[in-house]
Amino acid sequence: MNTLGIEDFFYVSDRSYDFLAEKSLPSYHEAHRVLVAAMCQNSSSEFKVIDLGVGSGVTSAYILKNYSKAKIVGVDLFDEMLSDARERLALFGERIKLVQSDNTGYLKKLQSKVHTVVSAFCIHHLDEEEKKEIFQIIYNTLMPGGRFLMLDLTTFDDPCMMKLARNATIKHMKANVKDEEYRKNWIHHWSEINIPHPADKMAMWMRDVGFSNVEIIFRNMEVALVGGTKQ
């Protein structure tokens, strides 16, 4: 397998990644709001979260703004992303810690259990076996009652729905992003880098490793939020 580099993920030359990501991805902010609510915590509860593929910190910012005592470790492989996350999340002080690492490497070395693991548009480049592996590692990382929430690009088994959903995503991006070079790079990323799987299939894989109450919590064509609990 070829190793992916920053050029495969961060190709916006003017560092406007967040602005263009939210324009490109259908239901970007709506899905994040659902993810935050689906953590099912009291707004003043104290709990620890791992944000896999923290990127520029959008998901962590949503969580920290809505849960005043939550603490997060944000994990990302790339300096470019962590630099932006560090700037975005600075106002949260010691409630956020940023770690440069690949996701599985970090989780395998973790010494203590956490209540929540989230990932947002983070694991769609993993193949089936790699997704199953990280689901198992995440399950092992959680304390009893802990939750895993995965927001990502998905697909469908039905060829008609697969084509319909992909076209809807591209149509949304073209309607909201005018930069032709960015459009080309993004479509290449979706077509050549991503390995999306159906949301219900990933839910099944989560059940297979032990998660219960696994649900597709939110869906808009290719964008889906899947969640499960460790009993």
Image: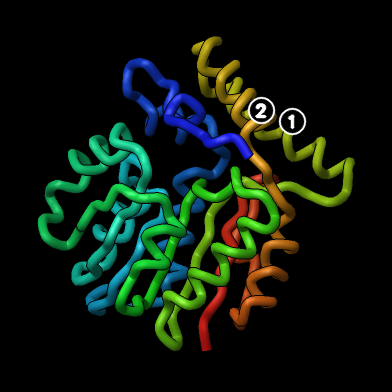
Query: What residue is pinned by disc 1?
Result: 167
Quarter of the image holding residue 16? top left
Q: Is residue 97 above or below residue 159?
A: below
Image position of 132 (left or right of 113): right
Marking on residue 9? none
Q: Quadrant of the N terminus?
A: top right
Residue at x 26% of width, y 67% of height = 67
Count numbered badges in the picture: 2
Q: Is residue 121 above or below residue 63?
A: above
Q: CA distance from mark 2 to mark 1?
A: 5 Å
CB under 8 Å between discs 2 and 1: yes
Task: State the residue in front, 108 or 202.
Answer: 108
Residue at x 31% of width, y 76% of height = 111
Residue at x 60% of width, y 16% of height = 184
Q: Position of residue 101 (x, y in %)?
A: 35, 50
Q: Position of residue 76 (x, y in %)?
A: 36, 47
Query: What residue is pinned by disc 2?
Result: 170
Residue at x 44% of width, y 88% of height = 144
Image position of 101 (left or right of 221): left
Type of residue at label 1? Answer: Asn
**Given the current orientation, which residue lies at the most extreme top position?**
180
Type of residue at label 2? Answer: Ile
Q: Position of residue 108 (x, y in %)?
A: 42, 67
How many residues crowd around disc 1 within 10 Å: few (fewer than 14), some, or many (20 or more)? some
Q: Position of residue 140 (x, y in %)?
A: 48, 77
Local SS, label 2: helix
Task: State the residue in front, 174 or 55.
Answer: 55
Local SS, label 1: helix
